[in-house]
Image (spheres, helix red, strand yellow):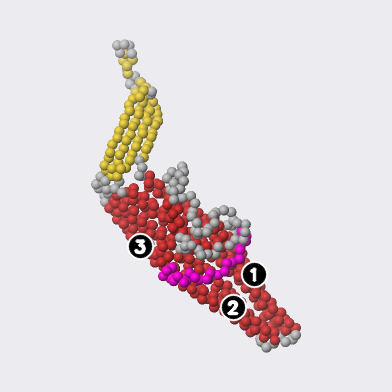
Amino acid sequence: MICRFSLLALLASTAALGQPATHDDPRGLIPLNPPPVSALQAPCGEVPGRALSLPDLVDIALCRNPATSASWAGVRVAAAQIGIAKAATLPSVNASIGPTLSSSKSFQDTGFIDANGNLVGGSSVLTQVNSSARLAVNYLIFDGGARRANIDAASAQQRAALASYADAAQGVVLNVITAYNNLSANRAVEAANLANLSFARLSRDLAAGRKRAGVATGADQLQAETAYSQAELTLIQTRGAIATAAAQLAVAIGLPPTTKLDLAPTAPLASGDRLKLGADALIADAEKLRPDIVAAKANVDAAAANVRSAQSAGRPSLSATASNTLSAFDTTIDRNVASAGVSLSLPLFSGWNTRYNIAAARARLEQQTAIAEQTRQQAGLDVYSNYVALDNALSSLTTARVLVESASLSADLAQGRYKAGVGTFADLLNAQSALASARQQLVQSEFNVRTTNAQLARAVGSIGEAVDATR
């Protein structure tokens, strides 16, 4: 029994945990490692040396796929923005120090001798070294709620970034599952084609034997050779498709396309128990679990905070400042000036800039609210569409199994009748073709069940549980 595992709940708890303070992150706000997508996900490391199961491939992809790396970097950027917003709640301290070399020259065309015999006038040069050191502290005491609104907006944007990472990670998981199912389906097609080739070979041998016995025409043998060659060609094409599917799977997990993957046997088909919950229950789960819905709600919160930030621009602000400046000329201290004060700023008129900023922020809030509702409605449609698709795929699988069984019996009967001389080779070819088609449909039906089951889990937002169920 797999425990209920919510990726978004884990993301929220990860965001709430304090990270170790570093030089670049003194507040400990920026998370270091991405959280797991499923409860039983293995930590990142080297590719295991054993045969890889589907969960193994998913774990590798979540560590190596560039899509998850890029999305996680976005989470770290959003976390840093919270630190930037919180910086405004602390005072700023600035120090400056340095010498200044100044030189002045004066010129006078004529001069005169004073009573002491000194020359007065003419040219003169004055050179000085001025030094100063200043320490200033500034603190914004009250700003009408702008800082709090900016912090709330940054926090909401981080929640949106976390949800976007969750969405990207679940998308990577679905891509891996689809690529894995595609490779498995092509291998199943290869097995079906080998069975078709064996049946075609037996039919060819029967036609050749009857021709040698003089009880069949050359046309039968030619048709048998054509059917056999067609079966061989189909097998060759399928093996090419297998190579392509294997390369696509390798790339999906973040490895070079030429990587040779040692895969464990495919797990049995899912039972379709998810359908027992009903579409309404699955839609309700999606509204709580889907990352895109969480991201849309976080964007609404960020837009609401931006409205408050815009409104604060029209309110008074109160600041406190203090500074001390030490000046010297050459080596002699000239003066020491200290100052402190409180400043009240009252915005009176800005050409209605503040009002339009508020109007724009409110319009963006309305926009994000509408997008969130649109996202919720689309999520419900995605769940229901995949719910119907899985139900249809399971029904088609049952029919495909019956079809293969009846086509096999029909082909064996046609082959036996032809061997006994009471059936035509055309009947045998028709039965052989019907059997090959039935086997192909069975493989496609199994692929559809596996893929639509994963797509439904993705639509609900619980694809991590689907992966854990196969471990």
Residue 56 visible from this viewpoint:
yes
Q: Nearer the viewer, residue 115 or 324?
A: 324
**Residue 252 appears in the picture as rendered:** no
Extreme residue in the top direction: 116
Locate residue 53: give its quadrant: bottom right
Task: Provide the major secondary structure of the magenta segment.
Answer: loop
Residue 343's place in the image compared with 471, above or below, is above
Rendered location of residue 289, percent (x, y): 43, 62
Q: Which residues are magenta?
A: 259-282
Alpha-carbon span between mark 3 and mark 1:
53 Å
**In the displayed structure image, the side of residue 354 where residue 241 appears, left or right:** right
* Residue at 43% in and 68% down: 282
Q: Residues within 10 Å of mark 1 (few under 14, many from 20)?
A: some
- Determine the residue located farthest toward the front in the rendered image: 1
Circle nearer the N terminus (2, 3):
3
Task: Report helix, strand or loop for mark 2.
Answer: helix
Q: Amino acid at mark 3?
A: Ala
- Residue 452 in the magenta stretch? The answer is no
Q: Is residue 271 magenta?
A: yes
Q: Nearer the viewer, residue 350 or 252?
A: 252
The tag on residue 370 is 3
Disc 2 designates what residue?
Answer: 404
Q: Earlier in the sequence, mark 3 or mark 1?
A: 1
Identify the residue at horizontal 31%, vertical 37% (top origin): 321
- Please name the amino acid that badge 1 sits on: Ile
Outermost residue on the right side: it is 213
Residue 429, numbered circle: none
Viewer-side label of 2, 3: 2
Q: Nearer the viewer, residue 312 or 233?
A: 312
User: The disc labelled 2 sits on which kind of residue?
Assistant: Val
Label placed on residue 236: 1
Is 445 situated left or right of 155 in this image?
right
